[in-house]
Image: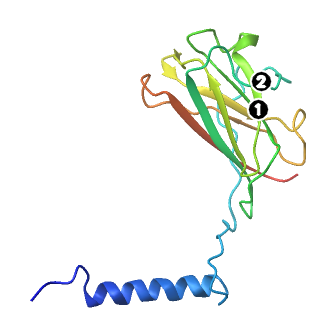
Amino acid sequence: MARLPFTRRDMLLAGSGLAGAALIAGGSGLIAPLRAQGLEPTPTMRGGANNYRPGAPLVERIGGGGFLMTGTVRRAGDGAPLEGVRIQIWAHTTEGHERDWDSHGATLTDANGEFRMDMPQIVPAFGQPHGHLAYDAEHGRGGFETVFLRPVMASTRETTLSAHFVLKPV
């Protein structure tokens, strides 16, 4: 007798998963995306504001590129993505120090609250390869508290770094 690729238990688990999805959708048959209820705001990280230059220009990329900084911006509480939020990015790279004006640039989030910036490869400063990112209420669209981030890369060989903001409404 040929063995089926699934067991009775697999069928029961699959059925309960579908029933749960129907309950989430309110019985409509459509699965609604879940929002993060009670999502806590991101605190400012120690050292995040180092070498910050208020009002860096919106740019397509910083320098010659080759390294990708990405992330998301969401509203605290319901986790809704925030569109059109200005995020400033700067780092110590193969093309310049993080205090150099040319090492700073800003970008805007898209409809999904996502941002990306092509920039030169990040290199260690003070022994750690790290980037700096900021949401500055004074230079952004307002309505949220300022947050500075300083994510550290696990290795100098990495060619991407992500940082995620959850902004607290004022």
Q: Secondary structure at mark 2?
A: loop
The structure residue drawn at horizontal position 58% and vertical position 29%, both measured from the top left corner, is 68
In the figure, 79 relative to 106: above or below? below
Q: Position of residue 164 (x, y in %)?
A: 64, 44
Is any part of residue 51 visible from this angle? Answer: no
Residue furthest to the left in view is 1
Give whichever of 87, 53 is nearer the camera: 87
Residue at image mark 1: 107
In the figure, 106 relative to 141: above or below? above
Q: Position of residue 136 (x, y in %)?
A: 82, 35
**Label located before the other in sequence (1 or 2):** 2
What residue type is disc 2 on? Val
* C-alpha separation, residue under disc 1 versus residue under disc 2: 6 Å
Any mark on residue 44, and which? none
Q: Quadrant location of residue 31?
A: bottom right
Q: Secondary structure at mark 1?
A: strand
Considering the image in quadrants, where does the N terminus appear? bottom left
The structure residue drawn at horizontal position 38% and vertical position 85%, both measured from the top left corner, is 13
Q: Is residue 135 left or right of residue 37?
A: right
Residue furthest to the front in view is 2
Residue at image mark 2: 59
The structure residue drawn at horizontal position 15% and vertical position 84%, both measured from the top left corner, is 3
Is any part of residue 154 visible from this angle? Answer: yes
The structure residue drawn at horizontal position 44% and vertical position 31%, both measured from the top left corner, is 154
Give whichever of 150, 81 is nearer the camera: 81
Asked whether disc 1 touches disc 2, contact meaning CB atoms under 8 Å apart, the reply is yes
Label 1 Cα neighbours within 10 Å, binned few <14 / some 14-19 / many ≥20: many
In the figure, 157 relative to 109: above or below? above
Q: Is residue 86 left or right of residue 23?
A: right
Give whichever of 87, 61 is nearer the camera: 61
